[in-house]
Image (spheres, rainbow, N blue to C red):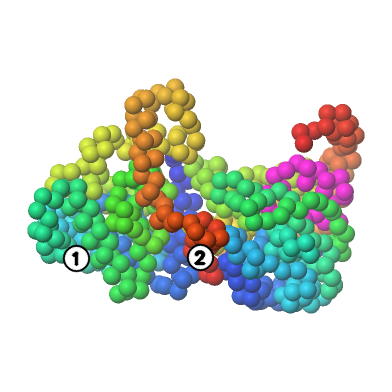
Amino acid sequence: MKLDLDLTVDILTNFIKEETEKIGLKHVVLGLSGGIDSALSAALAAKALGGNRVFAYCMPYKLSSEESLKDAIKVAETFRLNFDVLEITPMVDPYFEMQEDISKLRMGNVMARQRMICLFDMSAKVAGLVLGTSNKTELLLGYGTWYGDLASAINPIGDLYKTQVWELSEYLGIPQSVVDKPPTAGLWVGQTDEQELGFTYREADDLLYAMVDERRRIPELISMGFEEEFVKKVAERIRRNQFKRNMTVIAKVSQRTIGRDFRYCRDWGY
Amino acid sequence: MKVHLAQMKPVLGNLEKNAQKHFEIIEQAVSEGCDLVVFPELSLTGYYLLDLVYDVAMDENHPVYQKFLDYSNEIAIVFGYVYESREKLFYNAASFVHRGKTVHTHKKVYLPDYTLFEEGRYFAAGSSIQAFDTEFGRCGLLICEDVFHLSSLYILSQSGAQNIIIPSNSPARGNLELGHDASNAWQTSNRYIAGVLTVNLVFVNRVGVEDGVSFWGGSEAYDARGRRLAAADMFKETGVTVDIDIDSVRRARIETPFLRDEKSFLVRNFLNEEGGRK
């Protein structure tokens, strides 16, 4: 689980630079929530391209904490990013008013998708790629909004577990207040990820690393000391959220179907 | 022998652009007085071709290939491409061209088809490994995965190869904890092969990123005593020119006569009696 930090930074910064520049773009765009994942994506992008080529947007809702905006500003200042605040309240509130008994979860998803709309619009405005900010733990557990915060053009941190995100963030000098605060999707006031998930990220990462990276099977995981219920719960989450990690499901009719037997890389011709 | 290790990044699926890049590097190597320039695996096409395999395939009659033959009048060249056979099979191939002729074409025998690789889905597997004579002594050409099979090394060693050339496309992965990544596996293997087979070794790995997969570069050359003569930076598009003393093989085989003492009858008897695994 412990990263070779220098090598990882080399790989990730080079990834951002190449995947952006090879298609003829100079800029990247990302949402900066004040949390550690987006801070790490931003730090890597600044290291890869220079802060002046990174466009970061904090997109609070009226119930978002003041702290997160302050932290986002701190990150933007630390890495000298172009920074702006796009408050989504006037965009989503009218819709919430139309939907009388909307749940907290639905509201959270709508906000995430509204932020996606803003980011992709900014991407058109500044001619930049939308940079993903979902880590491997979130992607495996499906802890993210489909076509919301999970939507991006390229994702530099999608193969890093949350534990590794912490490790790398310390290494890159991300402000301590951002590193230290409890992870939150900011879905509602006082929400923390670990409370909502029912386990800590570090517990999950130890299990995920053994299960996914080391391909250990359930009996083996249990004999390693992981609680059976916890193992099954996490395995089930991974399975149930596979849809979020796939392209849309296409009904096959022809000889060559997109994604199935019409197969090309995104980097085709670049 | 002055060798240029061309650690380049190809454009995915654009033969013309890549050929142009090759020719610029070749001209540069000629002007530096190099005898041989070595490009990575699939240097003319890029790696993750998928359905592009059929669009970039070529044979000796292709104008791009002909141009390589023209350039080979000035310098020996090893380059990687998709070879389309008369039977309309597609191979992951590399050719050694010199003096206007194809000296040797190697078709990758061991196609990795696991985890992040799916070469077996698109390529036909080559079925022979042969050493070949060049102006720089007897050479062997292996493509990437071929190297991790003892049969390849054994055949080349027993057929008298003194220089082993390895065009490669190795993705960076497993960069957890120092010393457990792909580059470590390769450096260990390269040093081992050079020292134990007592051969000069040239390993040229590509750089660049394709759909999030980074190729780590780190091309290197060893003499026949397993000493590293030169190494290129990781992840950087660059070239390294190295002087390889062909006589180092002679010295190594006097000092460490592993080849002389190899008892190949053991292998022959084993294969005859036990049949081997397959």
Whether residue B36 sits left or right of residue A133 in the image: it is: right
* Residue lying at 46% horizontally and 64% vertically, measured from the top left: A19
- The answer to whether residue A139 is seen in the rendering is yes
Whether residue B136 sits left or right of residue A198 in the image: it is: right
Along the polypeptide, which appears first: circle 2 or circle 1? Answer: 1
Image coordinates for residue B25, horizontal then vertical, percent: 67, 73
Tell whether position B163 is magenta. Answer: yes
Q: What amino acid type is highlighted by mark number 2?
A: Asp
Front-most of residues B157 and A99: A99
Element under disc 1: loop
- The answer to whether residue A93 is seen in the rendering is no
Q: Quadrant of the C terminus of chain B?
A: top right
Q: Are marks 2 and 1 on the same chain?
A: yes
Q: What amino acid type is highlighted by mark number 1?
A: Leu
Q: Can you tell which quarter of the image residue B221 is in?
A: bottom right
Q: Is residue A235 above or below residue A227?
A: below
Q: Which residue is mark 1?
A: A86
Q: Which residue is mark 2?
A: A267
Element under disc 2: loop
Image coordinates for residue B268, horizontal then vertical, percent: 88, 35
* Residue lying at 78% horizontally and 74% vertically, measured from the top left: B61
Residue range of the region highlighted in magenta in the rendering:
B138-165
**Chain identifier of the residue bearing label 1 in the image:** A
Image coordinates for residue A177, horizontal then vertical, percent: 23, 48
Image coordinates for residue B112, horizontal then vertical, percent: 64, 48
Q: What is the CA distance from the residue labelled 2 to the residue labelled 1?
A: 32 Å
Q: Can you tell which quarter of the image residue B202 is in?
A: bottom right
| Crowd around label 1: few <14 · some 14–19 · many ≥20 (10 Å) | some
Q: Can you tell which quarter of the image residue B132 is in?
A: bottom right
